[in-house]
Image (spheres, rainbow, N blue to C red):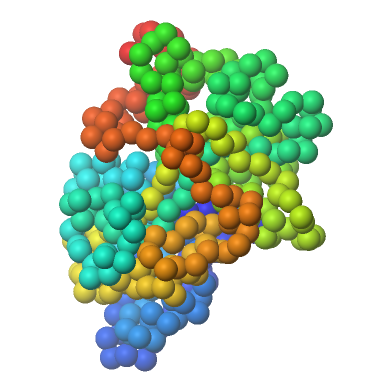
Amino acid sequence: MRAPPTRTLLVALALAGLIGGSALAETLTVLTHNAFAVSKDVIQAFTDQTGIQVTFVQAGDAGAEVNRAILTKDHPIADVLYGVDNSLLVRARDAGIFEPYVSPLLSTVQPAYRFDPDHLVTPIDAGYVDLNADKAALAKAGVPVPIDLSVLTEPAYKNLLVVENPATSSTGLAFMLTTIARFGQNHPGDWLDYWAKLRDNGVQVTSGWDEAYNTAFSRYGGDRPIVASYTTSPPAEVIFSKTELTDSPTANVLCPKCAWLQIEAAGILKGTRHRKAAEAFIDFMLSKRFQEDMPLNMFVYPVITGATVPAAFTTYGPVPTAEQTATLSPEAIAAGEKRWIEQWTAVVQQGRDPAAVR
């Protein structure tokens, strides 16, 4: 889901060229978002087992990645797409970019993470989008860590928040959906009014997570001490710190309906000429070796039963409770996503009155 915030992951370059000794000598191309990361020896194990060479092509944030797959669907640039999530599936499904596949290992996936009854995609990992706060930067500014989303519209938080564009970023889309679930759609005081207030309070919008976290966020040279990120980002700050820490320098903003469960999946792109290789790779992504490799590479949770996670995850980034998690039905997302993004764009980026775009 996310790259560790203190290092650049050049996964595509690192993994390109791996090849095993099998007679298959087949090459599989996997389209991913920029935060995808997996250990070289794990992919080497897949290649050794199958003879299939794996090449990874990174395409920006997950939203941009799905858009690229849609734009190239008549001439697909990959065989498998990894990174489509439960918020983006509607967009991908309507565009018809996937071929159905039911992995024989799907039964090992915890039922809560099986979000696609049509089996166009297979769940691979899970995480929670929420707001992260730079505790030291806020303390220096004399502003407390937010205790609710609503306080971000107050003058004390002016010019302190950075979020991602929901039209191009899966993180941004998840946070927008969080606000819809939290504030509802019955004006006055609904989600559009909330975003209008955030706009007037100086919210910054970036195209994707990497720009928001690694550039705009105050922890990494920016001037925004509150960022839309993930509950596993505080553990990442501890794990990758150059000095030993006893606490995370960042905090999750967890309150009622403040977090969004994001389940990332992989799907076989329609038109692939390597269908069997694609199936084999998706099966491999559900293996315990791959699942247990993900947490410290992408700071996500595995989806299969029995896979372990680092202790720092539970210490510094506990899984949000049901009360803290915002939800919308798949049917509601399917019916509203396109309209919501258009409304968000009109209000936040074009400065229009919410009443004029409802």
Residue sitting at x 73%, y 58%: 241
Q: Could you tell whether 3 is left or right of 145 in the image?
A: left
Q: How many marks?
A: 0
Residue sitting at x 73%, y 38%: 135
- Residue 352 shows in this picture: no
Q: Does 272 appear above or below 188?
A: below
- Residue 174 shows in this picture: yes
Q: Can you give x and y, in whole percent of width and height, for residue 262 in the image?
A: 41, 46
Q: Could you tell whether 239 is left or right of 56 in the image?
A: right
Q: Nearer the viewer, residue 295 or 62?
A: 295
Q: Could you tell whether 107 is left or right of 298 in the image?
A: left
Q: Could you tell whether 60 is left or right of 253 in the image?
A: left
Q: Can you give x and y, in whole percent of width and height, for residue 118 in the image?
A: 18, 52
Res 254 quadrant in image: top right
Q: Nearer the viewer, residue 31 or 322?
A: 322
Q: Does 157 appear above or below 102?
A: above
Q: Nearer the viewer, residue 331 or 99?
A: 331
Q: Can you give x and y, in whole percent of width and height, for residue 156 in the image?
A: 70, 19
Q: Nearer the viewer, residue 130 or 94?
A: 130
Residue sitting at x 39%, y 10%: 187
Residue sitting at x 32%, y 90%: 22
Res 138 quadrant in image: top right
The quadrant of the rendering that contains the C terminus is top left
Q: Does 247 appear above or below 322?
A: below
Q: Can you give x and y, in whole percent of width and height, for residue 238 in the image?
A: 69, 56
